[in-house]
Image (cartoon, grey):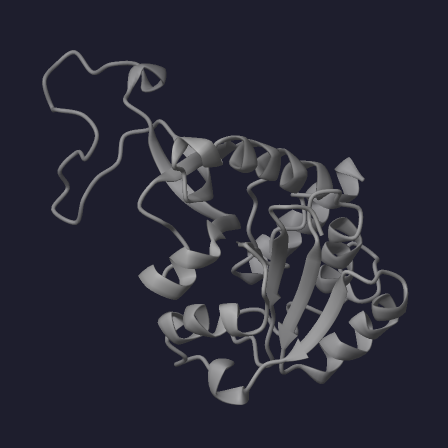
Amino acid sequence: MKAENITFFLPTRKGSQRVENKNTRMFAGIEGGLLEVKLRQLLKTRNIDEIILSTNDEECISIAQKYTNRDTRFKIIERPNHLCLDVTNLQDLIEYVPTITEADHILWGHVTTPIAGADEYDKAIDLYLSKLQEDVDSLISVVELKNFLLDQEGKLINNSTDLPWPRTQDLDALFEINHVMFIAKREVYEHDKNRIGKKPIIYTMDKIKSFDIDWQDDFLIAEMIYKNLF
């Protein structure tokens, strides 16, 4: 491993409620679905030293098993069922992650972001590593929002109501976490009990690569995007 080694933590679990068998059902004609897509992407990366599939799903294990003999970086670690429930506290899962890897840095990503591939991960890691001497402790991927947003009372969040209204492109940018990647020093997990440190880099991605599957409509849209691009 290089001086600053990085583990990719890829969690999946049984029992997706919003999209049935979301991780493993056929996706864009690919057997093994989103999990197969993501594993192929990760195995093409140059900056990731260890890839951990953390799951309690037998189907995920079956799909992924073939890669344990193809790339020494790849491991399957069965996650305890109490950390795979709908009611599992994210904090408990965060505290679990550094117990299964000795890496200096942890990149947490998801199979539900099929448009973000190896090049995007490597680019973000290059940026993150280049900033470590500036006391940066984490990186979080986002998509930029420049639009008129309302709170629950109907008040504009990012602009006053003074007329004339500005153009949307002239608004101050807000950033939405896109769940493609969270990179952080091991110490952030162990001491801060978090995936984001106190001095993060905001890594902006375009909307297409940021696409995250959460609902059935998202799954169908992602398939169309993936087929069109790849």
Q: Quadrant of residue 175?
A: top left
Observer-nearest residue: 35 or 121?
121
Q: Residue furthest front?
A: 3
Any part of residue 140 in sight: yes
Which of the 4 image quadrants contains residue 193? bottom left
Residue drawn at 65 percent across, 49 percent down: 222
**Residue 199 image offset from top left, x and y in percent:** 34, 40
Query: Does residue 110 appear to the left or right of 36 in the view shown?
Result: left
* 70 left or right of 115 in image: right
Q: Position of residue 87 (x, y in %)?
A: 39, 81
Q: Is residue 89 above or below residue 126?
A: below
Q: Quadrant of the C terminus?
A: top right
Q: Is residue 149 above or below residue 75?
A: above
Q: Identify whether 93 is placed above or below 154.
A: below
The residue sitting at the bottom extreme is 81
Left or right of 224? Residue 156 is left
Q: Nearer the viewer, residue 57 or 129?
A: 129
x and y percent of residue 190 in the render? 40, 65
Residue 208 visible (yes or no): no
Front-most of 133 and 94? 133
Give the residue drawn at x 62%, y 63%. Answer: 10
Q: Measured from the top left, where is residue 63 in percent x and y?
A: 81, 72
Q: Residue placed at 80% from the left, 54% from the top?
A: 40
Count of numbered badges drawn on the protein: 0
Residue 127, quarter of the rendered image: top right
